Amino acid sequence: MLATALVLAPYLAAARAASGELRWAGDPEGGAPFVEADPSNPDRLVGFDVEIAELIARGLGRQARFINITFSSIDQSVERGDADIGLSGIEDTAARRAKMAATVPYYRFRELLSVRDADATRFRSLADLRGRRVGTLGGTIAYDLLLRAERDFGIQAVSYDDDVHPYSDLVLGRVDAVLLDHVLAERRRRTIPGFMIQPHIIATSHYIGVLAARDGALRDRVNEILRGAMRDGSLERIFRKWGVWNDDQAALYERVLAGADVAPVSGMDAADLSLPLSGWEAARRYLPALIRAAAVTMVLSCLAMALAVALGIGIASGRIYGGKLARALLTGYVEAMRGTPLLLQLFVLYYGLAEVVRLPAFAAALLGLALNYAAYESEIYRGALEAVPAGQLEAARMLGLSEAQVLRLVRGPQAFRFALAPMTNDFVALLKDSSLVSVLTVMELTKQTQIFATNLGNWVLPGLLCAALYLAMSLPLAAVARRLERSWKERKP
């Protein structure tokens, strides 16, 4: 399917051009001033990238059409032909320049540290944050800078999927600083009190548009339009409208119009980020992080499954042996946990209850997975308990065993044998569902792979490495479960 899409992509792009349409990809979840739904009219998009897309479309004699793509997938979607160009605060990186047809830079931004008001004099630079937790968006230049700071200063990089929660967690004390570009930092400072932005510039880069590598001719036409907008002040008017114009842009436009080379990332802290990495070099660099993330996934999954099984056995026993009220309450819990998304439950535990109880990210992830899967395990074990022949239970009671002894010595062990296979399947499912805990800043395997793929600009090698690590974790578990099943069958009287 992918190969077919790539083969057809040029023909689809030509068809869209003939129809007078410029499809541009963006992510409204990033919000203003890039792309967001108009608060007064949710069906309408606003933001400076929306206006730049319309400017480009007019210059091409086409009609702009927005395509909603998750930010981390914009590059891949443009390359496979879902859209003609990606515009959504996309950062200028060496990897994008090497693999995509990137436009000239149209906005320069600064990577700045944000800290709590009380820490303004303590944390002025990355070096001051030695051993501290620093938040940022995954798959960004800022994240790469923090990975370097991990090596140099022992900083712990904390990855987020959006630019709201890093700053709310900063104010709550879950992280000690946030590193992001000044556009995002200044926007959040207007809505989230309690932090300030340090003036020291960690690095600078630019926003660009990205097109498929095969669309070099279209990229050149887009560049002509952007340069024209720099000359006649159209871009300046757009950025002034959105309150993000500064003197850095005039200096950038002067260099672009003069034809001077503009490095994707500049600043003494970012020198090695301006060099593109080959796939295998990137894999060598990211493999230790992938292995650490796999270890987090495995530990989290094992602990969550153990807790889920324990809770599930208790719930199942309560629904069979408990009173009417207990059965009703436990049934309500099971239906509520099975009837609502795990992702929603994780958000409520970590962010929704933050004003009442501030759970650490790992603890919230462990509790969320365990509470969710306990509902499923309870149904498995309840069915297994009810599958034990009634004759055996009556025989045990006639021998004088109490109900507790019947459950512990007769019914429970047989039920566990019946439940083993479906419980093993659930464990493998939990291992994969643990990828959702990245929304709580837990750096598990899938999240680390996504960051690797975003920075590399390709999912093939990261995806293969991720799949190999998941198989390395899940296949031995399945083999152990099959051996236990065979062993118990052989010992069955």
Image: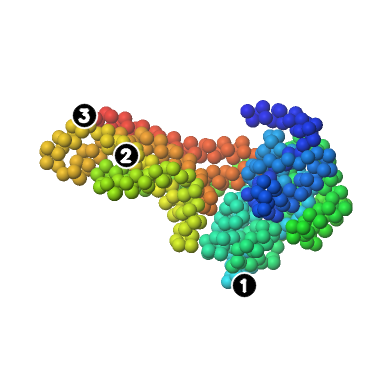
Residue type at mark 2: give it. Tyr
Residue with the mark numbered 1: 121
* Quadrant (top left, top right, bottom left, bottom right) of the C terminus: top left
Quarter of image, res 204:
bottom right
In this rendering, the label closer to the viewer, 2 or 3: 2
Residue with the mark numbered 3: 493
Q: Which mark is residue 148?
A: none
Residue 398 position (above or below residue 105): above
Quarter of image, res 490:
top left
The x and y percentages for residue 417 are 29, 35
The x and y percentages for residue 444 are 51, 47
Q: Residue at x 69, y 47 (%)?
A: 44
Residue 195 position (above or below residue 313): below
First in sequence: mark 3 vs mark 1: 1
Residue type at mark 3: give it. Pro
In this rendering, the label closer to the viewer, 1 or 2: 2
* Quadrant (top left, top right, bottom left, bottom right) of the N terminus: top right
Does any portion of residue 469 appear in the rendered image?
Answer: yes
Q: Tags 1 and 2 in contact by the CB under 8 Å rule?
A: no
Disc 1 is placed on an element classified as loop
Question: Which of the two residues, 273 or 409, is positioned nearer the viewer here?
Answer: 409
Q: Tags 2 and 3 in contact by the CB under 8 Å rule?
A: no
Q: Is residue 247 left or right of residue 44?
A: right
Numbered-mark total: 3
Residue type at mark 1: give it. Thr
